[in-house]
Amino acid sequence: MRFFLRPNIILLLFLFIFFIPSESLPLEGSEAGKSIKALSEHAASMDMIWTLVASFLIFLMQAGFTLVEVGFTRAKNAGNVVMKNMIDFAIGAIGFFFIGYGLMFGASALGLFGTSDFFLNHITHSGKIDNWKFANLMFQVVFAATAATIVSGAMSERAKFIGYLFYTVLISTLIYPVVGHWIWGGGWLARKGMIDFSGSTVVHSVGGWVSLAGVLVLGPRLGRLNRDGSVNIISGHNIPLVALGVFILWFGWFGFNTGNTLSATNPSIALIAVNTILAGASGALCTMALTWFLRGKPDVGMTLNGVLSGLVSCTGGVAIISPFSALVIGSLSSFILYFSLKAFELLRIDDPVGAISVHGVNGIWGTLAVGLFAQDKYVQNSLGYAVNGLIFGGGLTSSWFRRWQ
């Protein structure tokens, strides 16, 4: 109150009220007001277009996953792999549209799952068409499809098709939406402040661990293990297909990461794109060098998976880390990939495409990397508040870590 009683403040208020021309204020009916409204509408349209373009790029990742899985498996199973990747998107899209979206983004029940917005009623009951809701729904469904299709590679060459269809319904309408609600839908982890910008946990880790569950239930492929427990190598039939699939996935990842801004005018878009390039490239180079050193020659298949590991590992914090941190995170993902694959082999867990290691284990690494490598200036730029990770002085008792408690 004492602030408003100061004489100079009173004088300024008097001058503002009585001497500033009314034409200088952007009133609703004025030309300035109309211009501001038009700019706001243009910005909203740009955001919607940006979100849809990102959705289309992510949809293209379905082709990338299909090619990677076909190339890493035997030729006789190519048709089965293609069919599974096609149908899991078709079933997943319908299931998520009508049930999964509500579980993920509906009104929260104890922070565990959503309880509203089923069967598109958040769109149809508004009384007025809101095209942004359609754009957001499109963006969310391609993310759900990505989580679902990760699993098809790990379960290749021994899953019954009818069983796989039941799995697709389960992950698209229940598993992925519920976990997504915890972090992106205002659930209990979101309330604790968990940051997972593009889905190291929500998408990739979920897909990876569902893959592990499926592989444990199915057991190894016929011919993978000998009677003495030793492992036979079952090589994929077409490495060029794998390479093409990886490049398509890398291209789609630009939509996957930058699209999560949901805004064409967000200043962090360029940073996200650079971090996406650097993490994938460093994952490839370090995996190549590691296999060259340990095996005497670089391994093509492992190097291609190294690209994907680098991309998965940077996804959680891609908007809030520096380019140098993206390099470090991607580089370390190669070691995690290599030794994870070796560990699963020793445990006699048969994963033809390495999905559990690429998406599950490196999804965990990507989540932990957020708490290690986040930097306040990048967080401020992307999320509107400043906070540091452990490596950059946040400390175990910093405000960043209190957000997780």
Image (cartoon, rainbow, N blue to C red):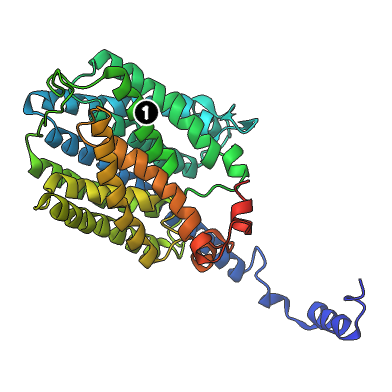
Q: Is residue 212 left or right of residue 388?
A: left
Residue at 53% x, 41% y is 183
Q: SS class of the residue under badge 1?
A: helix
Residue denoted by label 1: 210
Q: Is residue 57 left or right of residue 302?
A: right
Q: Is residue 177 left or right of residue 386?
A: left
In the image, residue 7 sits, relative to residue 302, either above or below, namely below
Give the image quarter of residue 238: top left
Between 68 and 286, the residue placed more toward the observer is: 286
In the image, residue 296 sits, relative to residue 353, either above or below, namely below
- Furthest toward the front, the residue is 228
Residue at 26% x, 19% y is 219
Between 280 and 105, the residue placed more toward the observer is: 280
Between 98 and 223, the residue placed more toward the observer is: 223
Where residue 11 appears, as percent x and y from the top left, is: 86, 84
Give the image quarter of residue 141: top left
Residue at 13% x, 31% y is 73
Q: Residues within 10 Å of mark 1 (few under 14, many from 20)?
A: many
What amino acid is at disc 1?
Val
In the image, residue 365 sits, relative to residue 1, either above or below, namely above
Residue 66 appears in view = yes
Where residue 120 appears, as percent x and y from the top left, is: 49, 29
Position of the N terminus by quadrant: bottom right
Give the image quarter of residue 31: bottom right
Where residue 158 appears, as percent x and y from the top left, is: 20, 19
Where residue 312 appears, as percent x and y from the top left, is: 34, 47
